[in-house]
Amino acid sequence: MNEPALRIRDLAKTFTLHNQGGAELPVLRAVNLDVAPGECVALDGPSGMGKSTLLKCIHANYRATAGSLIVRDGDTATDLTTATPRELIALRRDTVGYVSQFLRAIPRVPALDIVAEPLLDGVDATPEVLADARREAEALLLRLRIPVRLWSVAPATFSGGEQQRVNIAKGLIRKRPLLLLDEPTASLDADNRVTVMAMINEAREAGAAIVGIFHDQRVRETVATRVIDMREFI
Amino acid sequence: MNARTEFATAVIREEGYNFAYLDERTKRMIRRAILKAIAIPGYQVPFGSREMPLPYGWGTGGIQVTAAIIGAGDTLKVIDQGADDTVNAVNIRRFFQRTTGVATTERTTEATLIQTRHRIPETPLAEGQVIVYQVPIPEPLAHLEPREAETKMMHGLAEYGLMHVKLYEDIARHGHIADTYDYPVMIDGRFLMSPSPIPKFDNPKMHRNPALQLFGAGREKRIYAVPPYTTVESLAFEDHPFEVQKWEHACALCGSRESFLDEVITDDKGGRMFICSDTDYCGQRRDGAAP
Amino acid sequence: MTLLDQPILEVEGVTKRYGDRIAIDDIRFDLWPGEVLAVVGESGSGKTTLLNCVSARLKPDAGRVHFRTRHEGVVDIYDLSEASRRLLARTDWGYVHQNPADGLRMDVSAGANVGERLMALGERHYGRIRREALSWMTRVEMQEDRIDDSPATFSGGMRQRLQIARNLVTQPRLVFMDEPTSGLDVSVQARLLDLLRTLTRQLHLASIIVTHDLAVARLLAHRMIVMKGGRIVEEGLTDQVLDDPQHPYTQLLVSSVLQP
């Protein structure tokens, strides 16, 4: 149980801009970080220090330039920097959850289905499975105060706060051992912020390892068990 | 001997033409094509179709097949839409009388060789007889798939789903399969074949027929065959089975309820009657001689 | 090991030349069941040649394309007889053309278009064919009462949906798509994309989609291949390639469009 859910060693990320004379932008130089199950690590530091870049590397959205990123799920440990695309897809489905700042809405897909989708990924969507997934999605949307009349509407027209809550519900509906949160409360009102903080704590108490960016100091103090200053990694 | 055969036998063979008009080499070439066609029932064999002294569409394919196989001992019958005395039939019969001098007949049972346009005689054919069909368009898929390379491939691989697409389309539009003639058939479970524009009424007669059936398409330069006793199946759907035409009337002349009837307008006041299309069959029945 | 644990398509070293010009060079990739792979690149980069070579429409000069059949294990599609290859192409595979008129029979009804593959496989019951056609028309969001209409009377979006239904009626496991949305106006595109996305997921379809539209790739594809000059210059998860492009050409491609 003491094995970290995430072990980062000497992670570096440099962007090479080939179309701007091959300019090199080193963003992360040597990140070393372990995150244990039940821990919530807040990444702190001024903007431009690579907080989001680090989260995106852990989600394998950005490809690491050097180093290793080992994610553990039960007895299986996978290095994200060498995993095949297929393994990465499975990891994202089962192991690493990610709540981005903005919802990438899909035309015509209703909010309820967007939220339920992670539960249907990779399983045989029988009517029972589908009904169960929808029920869970409804419970989450209810808790996040999304009006029922919006459930069957595609979220492209939702307000920023509504979109973000749909995004949070989508990111948290499937219980994954590692959660990445990029400013999950940025555009939420006070009530919803409290709800989201409670949900994050519940996930952590249930054993998830969490890495997040929380600009709001009150949120950070409520959910984080450890704060890492990004300046350490320069 | 009745008046009709009297008229027919009045012509004698003219000198100056080779027997049956075509030269011997051409006839051998056509015979080879026929043999191949018999060996692969339903398969369209290409042949070097010749210019004939009548236009395409008048039976140039059938005439070349007949010319290639007719012998001095044959008795020839020629029908057009079932009748022996229509223009096309009369002309082709005279053509072979003049170029071969063979005996001709209107009686199905007496003929050894029958050339036909658009009908199969009502009187059942027997072993030893040969029937030659005139074919305008030998390719049953021609209207569905314009690329000939593709239709050849489809025959080669027995991919005939497209033919059912056509039948599906008929049922969807008309509630039933609308083809009433040139109704597609499968030969020996292998090749899709056009039976030539005979009414579908005649299709069942092709099935396991004791006679040799040969098909000639002059313009399209194809010969194909159905050897005696070969399976000939008319395409259909399980829930829309193949059916032949039926009439409420009997033949106004001979009273037959089994034969294919033509509707004939008798005056310009809307008077009409239904009579057998097969003139020999009808005449035999009226003479009390046969069926 | 189940079928899902093995690639459905393995492409090894596929090369095609037109005279001296190399159209595609040493292409290799695997495709897994249920996986959607986007092939992007500018015109002339070899996308369509690649699609034709792996879908048995164009024999490559070198290389192998292995397909895992339902019942007979792995086959090299170019070792198959013409008959088996054509059978495969109308049962286990689908091919969606950019221009629906190339993939439809424009002179027969919508129902006959959907039913053709069933009839080609020997279905001889009109009622069943029609029921199946109706069910597929509904799945691609077409009105049932258009079943007897000719696709010539349909809009571009409807034609494309009909083409998709016509391909999916035999429940293929692998569908090739050549710019399936590019001939359509934007509102119609969105609907079609959503439909494709839903169907590929529901039916667990493996698919190769050639597109020059990065947004299409983002929405539909798990993985992406970027082609330039007949070669694969970059590949990876779709969001990796779009959000963190490594190759100069990919960076140019991504920076050239507005919010892919």
Image: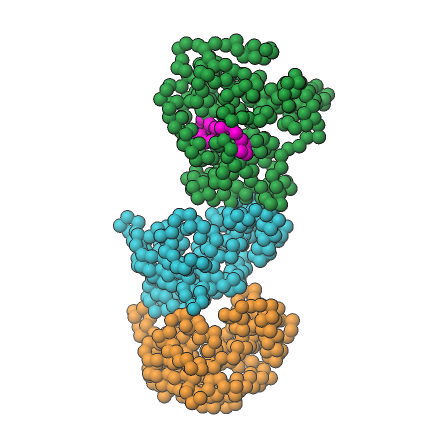
Asked whether residue B170 appears in the rendered view, the answer is yes
On whether residue B214 falls in the magenta region, the answer is: yes
Q: Residue at x 65, y 71 (%)?
A: A149
Q: How many marks?
A: 0
Residue occupying the point 50% across, 21% down: B112
In the picture provided, is B14 more to the left or to the right than C63? right
Q: Quadrant of the N terminus of chain C?
A: bottom left
Q: Residue at x 33, y 60 (%)?
A: C12
Q: Which residues are magenta?
A: B206-225
Percent across and percent down for residue B239 are 62, 45
Please state, as top left, top right, bottom left or bottom right, where the C terminus of chain C lies in the image.
bottom left
Q: Residue furthest left?
A: C20
**Which chain is assigned cyan?**
C
x and y, in percent, of residue C42 in the image = 37, 58
Residue B134 visible (yes or no): no
Q: Which hue is chain B drawn in?
A: green
Where C187 falls versus B233 (above or below)? below
Q: Residue at x 45, y 67 (%)?
A: C2
B266 or B240: nearer the eye?
Answer: B240
x then y, percent, for residue B132: 49, 25
Tell me, yes or no, whether the highlighted magenta stretch contains residue C98: no
Colour chain A appears in: orange
Q: Nearer the viewer, residue B288 or B190?
A: B288
Q: Nearer the viewer, residue C251 or B4?
A: B4
| Picture coordinates of residue B250, whole percent (x, y) | 70, 26
Horizontally, residue C234 falls left or right of residue A97, namely left
